[in-house]
Amino acid sequence: MEYQSTRSTQTASPREAVLRGIAPDGGLYLLPHMEALSFDWQACLKQNFLGAANEILSALLPDIGGMEDLVRRAYTGRFETPEIAPLVPVGEDYVLELFHGPTAAFKDVALSMLPQLLSAARAQTGDSAETAILTATSGDTGKAALEGFRDIPGTQILVFYPSEGVSPIQQAQMVTQEGRNVTVCAVRGNFDDCQRGVKEAFAALPREALRRAGVELSSANSINIGRLAPQIPYYFTAYRALLDRGAVGLGDPVDFVVPTGNFGDILAGYLAKALGLPVGRLICASNSNRVLTDFLTTGRYDSRRPFLKTSSPSMDILVSSNLERLLFLASGGDSAAVAGWMDRLGKQGAYEVPKGVLARIQEDFSAYFCDEAQTTATIGEVWRAHRYLIDPHTAVAFSAARQDRQARKSRGPRVILSTASAFKFPEPVLRGLGAEAEGDAFDQMDALASLTGQPVPGSLAGLREKPRLHRDCIGREEIVPYIRKRLGLEDAV
Ligand SMILES: *Cc1c(COP(=O)(O)O)cnc(C)c1O
């Protein structure tokens, strides 16, 4: 079984795909015919989270051995809830809570698993090179990756975040990170600048030269299939929880509403569907950076627009990497076409797909956006109606869910993915609840706890006192030289 690049006919074994992160031609690795796998989705629905993760990852990454152990090691003792991702009823919908991990955001689910997959793949290929993980973050990936990779033997992790683009709590989480193998660096620019810099590093540091220096680069972003695949299991466990409650019958399609930035989380839902899960529509929720809403309704992707900073910073993205995988699948595996669109995106900032491709995408996806005023209002409305506290990213999804009900007059239970704890973004949440946001972010976190009677998550509670260990801040054009220097490659590559 071979993974294929989205931009050419280059292939890689599952292990290689995980180790490389991105294909040498700049494309993303994908299994071209996932629906052809003999995967027993109904058996998978009988499993709990760990069991489902084991079955799905074993099917998608069959050459990585000992998966059951890897899964157990990844999740045991790291999440505050035994279910990992509990499903809770809120009004007529259900919320899939993905934020009970060590950094209080959904990226913990995948980034607890990825280090295990990488270490195993490396050990099992007999590879002695050190893996250097390069990560661009809009806020949540960075911390979750740092937690996942800290002190994992044979790895180093380098995280780049936009200096003005993350919330104060997110920044505090990253600059206080401990661990012998971690580097955290601010970049004067936005997330897209960070992501571009990291992608440039993959191109600028050729693999062969790196190997001679004993280093292999990889990525913790959802461009890595080893990061994307561990996001599939919670679609299965959410469906299973609906079955257990009698909310749906086996085979009934269920819509999922996903707050979206880099298109990884929602693409995992599409891959769950390819594995057989009865997913209905995937509803893509964007904030004011509505580039995906526009694309999914018109077929024209145009990143040439102002980059807006919103209260849901993890979704402030104008170039959504994983859309490339959807384009590949929806165009019937036309890697030449995908390479052309990505080339145009790089050079001109925009591209347009043919009507047939758009139509195929629209069979599965709907899209809505939610501006800042609506986001704040939604936080207040959901709290008043249900005494349920949501963060701004989740609020964007609630707004999209409501818009979709009105637009399609749809019925039936839906699952709204909740991607972060409200305590990570206390300022906009307090405003949403109609309260004053005074003092610094830590004061606001405490104010939110006393206003709502809900506890601050353990991982955020001690942050104020932790020493700031990482102070580097560089320009966006310095990312590649900085990486060279940190990895000791100045002479080698
Ligand atoms: C990363 C993130 C998202 C967006 O997920 P993608 O996979 O990038 O689409 C949404 N909400 C939160 C809180 C996040 O951290």
Image: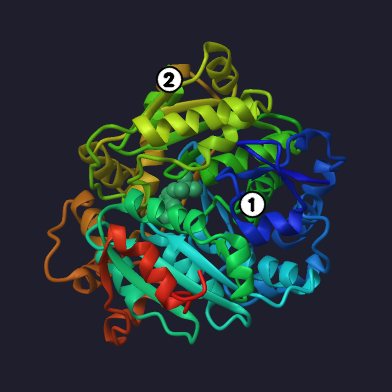
Identify whether 441 is placed above or below 273.
Answer: below
Q: Characterize the local packing of mark 1: few (<14), some (14-19) or many (20 or more) Cα atoms within 10 angstroms.
A: many
Where is residue 481? Give x, y as percent: 37, 67
Q: Circle 2 — which element? A: helix
Q: Earlier in the sequence, mark 1 or mark 2?
A: 1
Amino acid identity at mark 1: Ile
Taking depth in this image into account, of 214 and 2 the one nearest to the observer is 214
Disc 2 marks which amino acid?
Thr
| Relative to 87, residue 6 above or below | above
State how the image is colored.
rainbow
> In the image, which is nearer the foreground, mark 1 or mark 2?
1
Q: Which residue is mark 2?
A: 297
Tell me the residue that label 1 is attached to: 225
Q: For residue 77, what is the image quadrant? A: bottom right
Left or right: residue 189 compared with residue 330: left
Q: Residue at x 80, y 67 (%)?
A: 68
View extreme (front): residue: 491
Determine whether the residue tagged by mark 1 lies in a helix, strand or loop: helix
Residue at 23% in and 42% down:
308
Q: Position of residue 414 (x, y in %)?
A: 55, 35
**461 or 303, which lies in front?**
303
